[in-house]
Amino acid sequence: MSRVRLAALLLVAALAVPAGAQPRREDPIQSEQRKLQQTQKLLREEREKAARARARETSLLAELEQIERRLVEKQREVARLEGQIRRLQGEIRTLRGEIDRLQGHRTGQEEALGRRLRAMYRVHAQGGALPVILSGDDPVTRAIAVRHLTSLAALDARLIREYRGTTERLADRKGREEARQRELASLHADAQREQAEVDRDAGRRRVLLARVRDERAYHERMVGELTEASRRLEAFIRELQARQRKLAKVPPPRGGVEPPGVGFGTLRGRLPWPTEGRIITTYGAQVHPRFGTRTFRNGVDIEAAEGRDVAAVYAGHVVYTGWFKGYGNLIILDHGNEYYTLYAHIAEIQVREGEDVRQAQRIGTVGDTGSLAGPRLYFEVRYQGKPQDPAEWLRQRG
């Protein structure tokens, strides 16, 4: 019976499959489309990974800027705390002088009171003041004795009041001195904490700058970011120019216009230096001696000690003061007739936007904000937004 059923099943199967039928093959077009979809999916995933990696990768200039801004804030806070410490120390010295004077004064009062107490003891040992008043029959003599004793009593009362007043003032000065000492100790602790943070941030900055100088990948990244910062500065100056022209209702310049021979334009080769120092990085194309990277400098670096004065090379109008990425603290002066000068890496800006300055006026101090190589002044001269070689404008020395 089982053999019959098996035969029947085989017969049905044979009838169900057409003669000569082959296993179904996949359409090659569909296969390629599926492969393309898989490739596109992988590509999207890789792009997303790359985008996330770029988002995680902090800009070197941004990281340096963050560190430097925090350094400036912390250094300012340390300076403020040091000023408070000096003020408190002065107050403590003043209080200590008052305490010494009051203690000396109170010692004198104690000696005077001691003498009075000894005199009063002798009087009481002889029976007190009453025998003195009642001695003799002359009323005038008794009245004089009474007045004398009354004066002595008033004197004693005054000495005691003065002694108490001196003691109270002395206690007040000592209490104030102790309070100032506690405040001073707290300020010292705050200053030490802030200074530790300054040292920590300065250490991070040194490490980052060392990598930029010594590791090619960091150096090339920084070159790219500085080039982009230079382009941003170019665009920013064009915006400033357009704004200044609009305010002055002056039409934009035509191409090939010669620099005007008036004002700033008459001082080529005769401009005073913005600070004392020497040019250590020149204008123009630069090739890194180690990595061979090529850059173009729109200005010059003047080596100068930190804190040295920076002066306006010519009278002008302050059109920008503040932080600019890649340049640190930046000052831009408009000298009229499309001439501008730029001063970067400033430590302390001492002018405000909108202010007019005279030639040789102090506008800031030399610093290393935004600098990769220590304290220096970065200086540019521009005409119609285009950089000029500052060395051709500055007065020759020696």
Image (cartoon, rainbow, N blue to C red):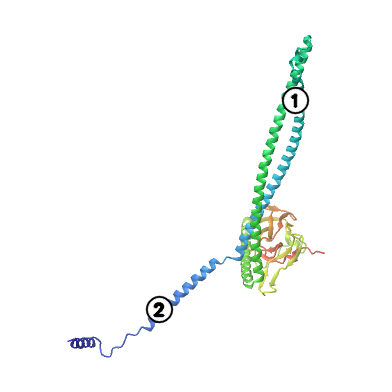
| Quadrant containing the C terminus in the rendered view | bottom right
Label 2 Cα crowd, 10 Å radius (few <14 / some 14-19 / many 20+): few
Picture residue at 69% right of the left edge, 48% below the top: 83
Q: Amino acid at mark 1?
A: Leu
Residue 231: where, in percent of width, then height? 62, 66
The residue located at (42%, 79%) in the rendering is 35
The amino acid at mark 2 is Arg
Q: In front here: 106 or 20? A: 106
Relative image position of residue 110 (x, y in whole percent)? 75, 30
SS label for mark 2? helix
Q: Which mark is residue 26?
A: none
* Residue 392: percent from left, percent from top: 75, 66
Q: Taking the image as drawn, is residue 66 in sight?
A: yes
Q: Quadrant of residue 40?
A: bottom left
Query: Which residue position is annotated with label 2?
Result: 34
Instruction: Give the numbered dot on residue 117.
Output: 1
Sequence-first disc among 1 and 2: 2
Q: CA distance from mark 1 to mark 2?
A: 117 Å
